[in-house]
Amino acid sequence: MAKRKWTRDRIVAEIRHLHEQGVDLSPTGIRQTHGPLFSSARSRSHFGSWRAAIEAAGLDYSIIKRGEQIWSREHIVKALREAHAQGEDLLSVSFKNRHKKLYSAACAKRYFGSWRKALLAAGLDYEQMRGDHFWSRARIIQAIRDLHAAGTSLNWSQIDRVNPGLYRAARRKENYGSWRDALIAAGLDPETVAPPRRRRRVKTKAAESA
């Protein structure tokens, strides 16, 4: 594969493109993620320093140097969808503290104005998430015992279909981590109350002819 040839114009265009994507353009950040770009920009034949390259792209180096995340509506939405897909509780204080920049950007008036609006823009069901969020460990255990007492099947696929909020809450890392462990915590034997479905045995031609 041919080596990418950097020119001053190409460097400026790439810096602007990365800036729009919300990439950390601080010297430390860009050196780790886009080493060739960083080295080329600093070469004497181009800009001589990363600062000069940043300023040539029309950006404020004093902000870039601090590594402040540059957000966009698209970048916020993508970050929220990825976090949700990884099973993160987007309504928890813990998540908001660990992702302060994301939370602040989403709530900023120039983007969405509130966390709820940002989640809705990401196509997430805010009301359902809100319901899931308020599942405590004690509430999960009580719900499982009530379902068991009512004779309801506790097989994970059945619960996921009829009570997805309970199922997802039980499997969260901060609760039990899995449906099986939640059943055990409720004092139930998973092998008895939620046996795995057996696969249908496929008869072979030899067996049919026997």
Image (spheres, rainbow, N blue to C red):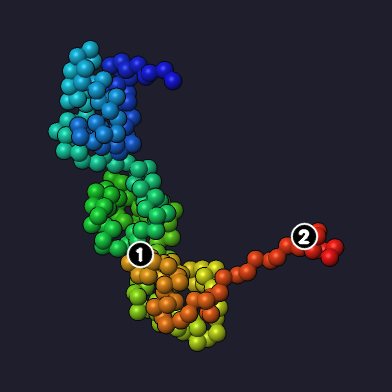
**Residue at point 32% right, 50% down?**
112
User: Along the line of sight, which residue is nearer the eye, 104 or 166?
Assistant: 166
Judged from the image, the secondary structure of the residue bearing numbered disc 1 is loop
Could you say which quadrant of the image residue 90 lies in? bottom left
User: Along the line of sight, which residue is nearer the eye, 151 or 112?
Assistant: 151
- The residue beneath circle 2 is 204
Precedes in sequence: disc 2 or disc 1: 1
**Residue at point 32% right, 23% down?**
13
Q: Is any atom of residue 121 visible in this view?
A: no
- The residue beneath circle 1 is 173
Residue at far right of view:
209
**Residue at point 39% right, 66% down?**
177
Could you say which quadrant of the image residue 85 lies in? bottom left
Q: Vertical placement of 109 versus 92: above or below?
A: above
Q: How many marks?
A: 2
**Residue at point 34% right, 74% down?**
136
Identify the amino acid type marked 1.
Lys
Q: Is any atom of residue 76 visible in this view?
A: yes
